[in-house]
Image (cartoon, rainbow, N blue to C red):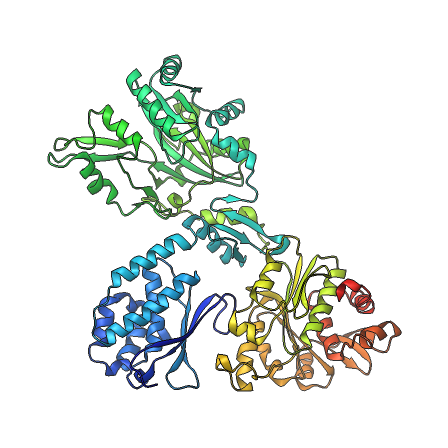
Amino acid sequence: MSHRHIEFLRMTHLRGPNIWTYRPVIEAWVDIGELEHSPSNTLPGFYERLTAWLPGLVEHRCGVGERGGFLLRLREGTWPGHIMEHVALELQTLAGMQTGFGKARQTHLPGVYKVVIRTRHEAVGRVAMEAARDLVMAAIEERPYDLAATLGQLKQMVDSLCLGPSTACMVDAAAERSIPAIRLNEGNLVQLGHGASQRRIWTAETDRTSAIAEGISRDKDLTKRLLSTCGVPVPEGRTVANPQEAWEAAQDIGLPVAVKPSDANHGRGVSLDLNTSAEVEAAFRVADEEGSEVIVERYIPGEEHRLLVVGGRMVAATRGETATICGDGRSTVAELVESQINSDPRRGEEEDYPLDTIRLNEHHTATLELQRQGLNADSVPAAGRVVTVMRNGNMVNDVTDLVHPEVAAQVALAAKVVGLDIAGVDLVARDISRPLQEQGGAIVEVNAGPGLLMHLKPASGQPRPVGQAIVDHLFAADDTGRIPIVGLVGGEETTMVAKLVAWLLHLSGRHTGLACADGLFLDQRRLERGSALGWEKGQRLLINRAVQAAVVESSARHILAEGLPYDRCQVGVVTGMPGAAGLEEFYIHEDGQMPNIVRTQVDVVLSEGAAVLNAEDPAVAELAGYSDGQVIFYAQSETAPALAAHRAGGGRVLFLRGTALVLASGEQETRVLDLTMPALSRLTGSLGVKPGELLAAVGAAWALDIAPDLIRAGLKSYGQDPAVH
């Protein structure tokens, strides 16, 4: 500690529940050197420089619990590790990643701190932590700091690495219902739920979205024919092969017409209200560049609307607006587009912008629209002249509450006819609050994988909870997408307990995965030899769609190094309090530090679940208060103090009375088996299962509501299947 600098000793991504929180975090070990003797209130000008760079720090409540709390700590005096925590969180927030949890704790070594921040992506969190160190040092040393460059880098990372807004809104909605989420790739493929109960989403598509339906929706001509057959109003039209056919079709259909690609997307290549052969033929060329086929159809007067259908129900609607500019007599069309349209903060190139940026040199439909008005990008419109740049693709105004019930029913029917569980239905109508037929309105497109941002961030009107609607479509009201997970922590005996519990779950009729120190198993078939402890092995079970229940053994080391591989569990078993030996690299030197680590296993027990705890280990018994669910104590002696007190209060316990294994809920008792039974001789003899291991396994099975008769039969038969070993 001889330097006036902040040095990173180690930086770890804890990917699951850990000693700090339920969520993934970046844990950085930092040595602040001589700065240990220089709290913030002793550094001239530090407060002013830091708050000038990051005025948003005023919102950090810190331990004070109110706005401005962290700034109060800064003025009173706090240390660089704690300051780094808040700076890193603020940098993530400014980059568009909302996080709020952070901790800074000193280790037993002077000047060495563990700094922890919540992050939604490992790479972003690491860069934010490193940038926080550099910014804090710049403020200490009165040096300039390029905050704009740092935020630019972080924003780019958030945009490219984190979930897009459509997927994120569904993940957030799932979290509100306690449905777990696992990101399956670097894109937007996400698993909601675990194992056999999971569903998958990919932006606004789900594993219920039919590939055939998606193919139909891309063929606009086929979509219209199917809709028309089922009585859904659609504009008359047909596919054409060249500009001449396009004009012939326009004359047959009747002017004005619209020309569009058969696989139009986001309004690209779509031209409206065409009245002359020159306009139609030019529109054909624009559409032909965008799609595989070109359609000419009757132009429907009115305003464009996008209605979102989820699970057969209309859940949101937006109305479009025409993009226009107003001439000033000095600026060109291109300059006016930049200053009056693209300057809108809602426009951008990324998915999280509800409106696209208009690039005249790339957007041929806009170019054609200008030509129809006798203009081009270099023209200078007269002052006050209103110029239409784009007629479609600007769905920005929420009108959900105005949609007529008949219109809602027709768009739901359109999605059903195509076969899409989630669809964006485009229609044109003068008044969305009236039935389509009476105003000559029509449905013009049915789209798979619709964008959701227009409903989440409309320019006017109320944002709609479309993510919640999709999650409710995938999961029934009482379904959290969870499978029974049994998590175990303790000593060496935990492995045998895990194998016994997996066997009993298997016999109960569930396809059961097991990750333990002896390997990775599925339905008693060994998939991998060697230790299967750790985050990656446990996740493999939860991703497997065949797994109906999972048993996952963990250790204090893996909790410290990675976090648990699941967010919550139905049953958490602690067989004993491990010692601190071997954990020195984590700054764990005393056995008294272990309960704070092992309690993580109890912290994650669901409210409808149970913690199964060894009552004969006082340190384990004291963890009972951390369980959100029930507590089941086990001990070889029914007089064990913690067990006896718990039973006296009406709690569930199990113990040995002589050689009999007894379950008790308050005064009610059930005798499960006698350890001297000949049928158990293999279990307790050659397999060497100890009474404590047997009690822990039975306690977990009891917590899973496995019947005593099945528990008894399972223990008798354990070890007879050679695939187990």
Judge left or right: residue 718 versus residue 373.
Answer: right
Residue 244: image x %, image y %? Answer: 36, 15
Residue lying at 30% horizontally and 86% vertically, measured from the top left: 37
**Relative to residue 150, is residue 115 depicted above or below?**
below
Using the rendered image of the protein, determine whether residue 283 is visible from the camera's viewpoint: yes
Residue lying at 60% horizontally and 65% vertically, measured from the top left: 569
Using the rendered image of the protein, determine whether residue 65 is visible from the camera's viewpoint: no
**Relative to residue 516, is residue 398 depicted above or below?**
above
**Relative to residue 80, is residue 407 depicted above or below?**
above
The part of the image, by quadrant, that contains residue 631 is bottom right
Direction right: furthest residue: 678
Residue 440: image x %, image y %? Answer: 40, 23
Q: Tell me the quadrant of the picture where the C terminus can be found.
A: bottom right
Judge left or right: residue 210 versus residue 248.
Answer: right
Residue 216: image x %, image y %? Answer: 52, 31
Tally of numbered tags? 0
Q: Tell me the quadrant of the picture where the N terminus can be found.
A: bottom left
Residue lying at 79% horizontally and 64% vertically, measured from the top left: 722
The part of the image, by quadrant, that contains residue 602 is bottom right
Identify which residue, 51 or 666, lies in the foreground: 51
Residue 140: image x %, image y %? Answer: 24, 76
**Relative to residue 357, is residue 248 depicted above or below?**
above
The part of the image, by quadrant, that contains residue 489 is bottom right
Identify which residue, 289 or 103, lies in the foreground: 289
Identify which residue, 11 or 305, lies in the foreground: 11
